[in-house]
Amino acid sequence: MDKVLIIGAGAAGSVVAKKCAMNRDVFKHIHLASRRLESCKKVQAEAKSPIDISQVDADNVQEVVALIGKVKPDLVINMALPYQDLPIMDACLETGVHYLDTANYEPRDEAKFSYKWQWPYHDKYAKKGIIGVLGCGFDPGVSNIYCAYAQEKLFDGIDTVDIVDCNDGSHGKAFATNFNPEINLREVTQRGKYWKEGRWIEIDPLSIAAMIDYPQVGPRKSYLIYHEEEESLVKHIKGLKQIRFWMTFSDNYIKHLDVLQNVGMTRIDPVMYKGTPVIPIEFLKELLPPPSSLAEGYTGKTSIGCIIRGTKSGKPAAVIIYNVCDHAECYREVGAQAVSYTTGVPAVTGAIMLFKGLWKGKGVFNVEQLPPVPFLDEVARQGLPWHVKPVTESDQKELFAVKT
């Protein structure tokens, strides 16, 4: 295996292409494709070594099939929009090519992301003799693998997982999203949800908050939202009693979000404007700065990890496994901000696992089902070092005290 096809040349897709180009010992042939050829040309010009480019409509299965036929890759890395997961998976199935993505499928007409559309591909992929790796970004992705590592190496049993995600950076814009605005706003404005004692519990959007102490950042107000890795982790972490996902949002972000919701700009259904149907959130996306434009001058850090509680040798134990990533350092390396970097680097690392035969199988798998140790060793070498430290109740008073 030495040929990779990357579909999607946005902020995170460009990181994947550039990091693949930095690992020529693994990726001998790199091909980048996107709906906008100009985006590919920009990445091609900035990459450290040569990459080929093409234009493709990732919604069109036969276009993707034709591109795969031309490139003949061993693996397709899907860095397109979540709407396009199924067409790309179908194209890989038709051509017998391995598949990897960073976010699960979401239909255009419903703000609902779930693995229920992708998990049924397992038997079809297995019959074809190929592997599909789902959710190999950071969260989902690295956070799942932190949990798998904790289950394998650190605990006899895991009771609770709190995935905590802080972007303590500043891009200097009045309002912007760090990844695709449409996907980001759909994610944040849907109802929250967490899993406890064998059932899902729904809450109003952003209705539960706590101060969480993030490594190298400090205490930041964090909101309980639903995130896709919870859906797979409840299946694969044995004995889990509770899992929650927390993310920081600034007061400024919340203020803008409230106004946009109140005036209907986050709607995903069409409204008529001068006889033409317009989807407000798609129009809003065109008004906001593209995430790739935020990188230059971005300051601060991301701090993302898993606070895991359980038992070890018959005694209660708690740790945080985490990564801290600096926006400015990411820009110096690949011209990206840390949110794009922390999504793109794990995808490249997952591809390295497949190319080196360290991850293998037939069918569709979430990353926590695959060996965690070689991935964590490699992702640290690729730029996302990870750390483990004990946690006490006094370290995370508000988080541990939240009644959910």
Image (tube, helix red, strand yellow):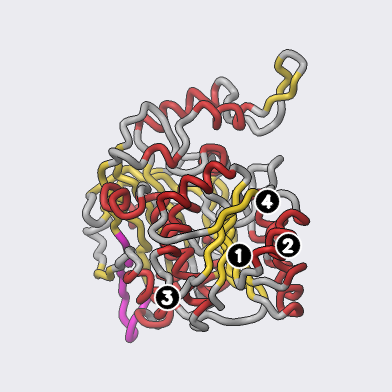
Q: Are marks 4 and 1 in contact (CB under 8 Å)?
A: no
- The percent coordinates of residue 106 (x first, y second) are 65, 50
Residue that carries the numbered disc 1 in the rendered image: 76
- The percent coordinates of residue 192 (x first, y second) are 53, 46
Element at label 4? loop
What distance separates the C-alpha of mark 3 from that of mark 4? 28 Å
- Mark 1 Cα-neighbour bin, 10 Å: few <14, some 14–19, many ≥20: many
Marking on residue 25: 3
Foreground tag (3 vs 1):
3
Residue that carries the numbered disc 2 in the rendered image: 91
Q: Residue furthest bottom?
A: 313
Is residue 64 visible to the viewer in this orientation of the structure? yes
- Which residue does the image show at 32% across and 36% down from the upper left? 171
User: Type of residue at label 3?
Assistant: Asp
Marking on residue 58: 4
Q: What secondary structure prevails in the magenta region?
A: strand
- Which residue does the image show at 33% across and 57% down from the upper left? 400
What distance separates the C-alpha of mark 3 from that of mark 1? 18 Å
What distance separates the C-alpha of mark 4 from that of mark 2? 10 Å
Magenta part of the chain: 310-323
Q: Are marks 2 and 1 in contact (CB under 8 Å)?
A: yes
What distance separates the C-alpha of mark 4 from that of mark 1? 12 Å
Q: Quick one: 341 or 142, which is closer to the camera? A: 341
Counting residues from the N terminus, which is met first, the one under dot 4 or under dot 1? Answer: 4
